[in-house]
Image (cartoon, rainbow, N blue to C red):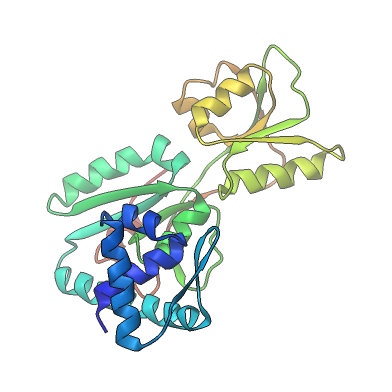
């Protein structure tokens, strides 16, 4: 069974659309369609049903999907191991948007200085999506908000983060919570914390940009719970009313990797001073 066909099959299954998968893979739609047909003919099985919203896996397709993921991951892992047999040649880093925008640059500069021959790649997303990328071998190491609590992951380092309540200085904010998009650890933390300190219902606005979030807070549209590092980085520390949280309410950033996919520079990452 051709692993390249399986990769296309996985992408189509994930996107639930031939056209979206083709766009993501950089292939012509007709090429992806013919590859899927080729795979179906090779195993004499229909893998997808057509539905109004796109396509979905058949029962046989669902069964093949789990096998395909395992096969592709093992092949990619074998290639990676061969390339990195003695030294770390490639390193793909996953990170939350918040950490990438505030602290990651210093680490990348130092890493490049200490290992000038490493090919570096950075992929940013929410904590939820970054963990998913790590578990699916799309990244080698990841900076995530909060303890992952996942038996497949190994914690390499811990970076302290101080969380504060951010509000407008000029206006008393309405009972509106402003957070980053779903999947962000600060999003879940903020909702739970606000529920614990207030019995009142609150509206919830979500944005995909911290500059927008801080500007809305400054304008008095609502409040948010954010790391002080983001507020300082975007020059809003003196523009907002900031209140430290009571108790053990901080969310550290953790550097993690897969237990079965440990980078060659593990010791370096464990000893690096991120704080």
Residue 229 in the image, given as x and y percentages of width and height: 49, 33
Q: Closer to the camera, 140 or 212?
A: 212
Residue 153 in the image, given as x and y percentages of width and height: 45, 68
The answer to whether any part of residue 249 appears in the image is no
**Residue at screen point 68% across, 18% down:** 220
Looking at the image, is 244 positioned above or below residue 11?
A: above
Which quarter of the image is occupied by the N terminus? bottom left
Q: Tell me how many marks there are.
A: 0
Which quarter of the image is occupied by the C terminus? top left
Q: Closer to the camera, 189 or 177?
A: 177
**Residue at screen point 51% across, 31% down:** 210
From this viewpoint, which residue is outermost toward the top?
170
Residue 112 in the image, given as x and y percentages of width and height: 19, 46
**Residue at screen point 48% across, 55% down:** 129
From this viewpoint, which residue is outermost toward the right?
199
Q: Is residue 57 left or right of residue 35?
A: right
Q: Is residue 275 left or right of residue 145?
A: left
Looking at the image, is 20 positioned above or below residue 227?
A: below
Q: Quadrant of residue 225?
A: top right
Residue 259 in the image, given as x and y percentages of width and height: 40, 73
The answer to whether any part of residue 196 appears in the image is yes
From this viewpoint, which residue is outermost toward the bottom?
44
């Amino acid at each position: 069974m051709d692993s390249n066909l399986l990769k296309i099959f996985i992408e189509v299954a994930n996107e639930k659309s031939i056209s979206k998968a083709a766009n993501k893979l950089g292939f012509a739609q007709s090429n992806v369609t013919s590859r899927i047909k080729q795979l179906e003919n090779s195993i004499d099985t229909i893998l997808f049903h057509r539905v109004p919203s796109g396509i979905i896996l058949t029962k046989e397709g669902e069964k093949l999907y789990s096998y395909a993921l395992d096969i592709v991951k093992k092949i990619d892992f074998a290639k990676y191991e061969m390339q990195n047999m003695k030294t770390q040649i490639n390193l793909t880093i996953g990170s939350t948007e918040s950490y990438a925008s505030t602290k990651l640059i210093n680490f990348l500069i130092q890493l490049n200085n200490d290992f000038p021959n490493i090919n570096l790649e950075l992929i940013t997303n929410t904590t939820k999506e970054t963990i998913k990328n790590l578990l699916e071998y799309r990244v080698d190491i990841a900076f995530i908000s909060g303890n992952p609590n996942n038996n497949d992951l190994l914690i390499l380092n811990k970076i302290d983060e101080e969380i504060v309540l951010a509000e407008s200085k000029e206006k008393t904010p309405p009972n509106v919570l402003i957070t980053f998009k779903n999947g962000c650890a600060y999003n879940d933390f903020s909702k739970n914390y606000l529920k614990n300190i207030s019995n009142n219902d609150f509206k919830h606005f979500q944005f995909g940009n911290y500059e927008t979030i801080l500007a809305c807070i400054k304008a008095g549209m609502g409040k948010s719970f954010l790391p002080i590092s983001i507020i300082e980085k975007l020059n809003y520390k003196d523009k907002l009313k900031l209140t430290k949280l009571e108790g053990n309410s901080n969310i550290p950033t953790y550097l993690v990797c897969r237990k079965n996919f440990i980078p060659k520079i593990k010791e370096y990452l464990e000893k690096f001073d991120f704080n």
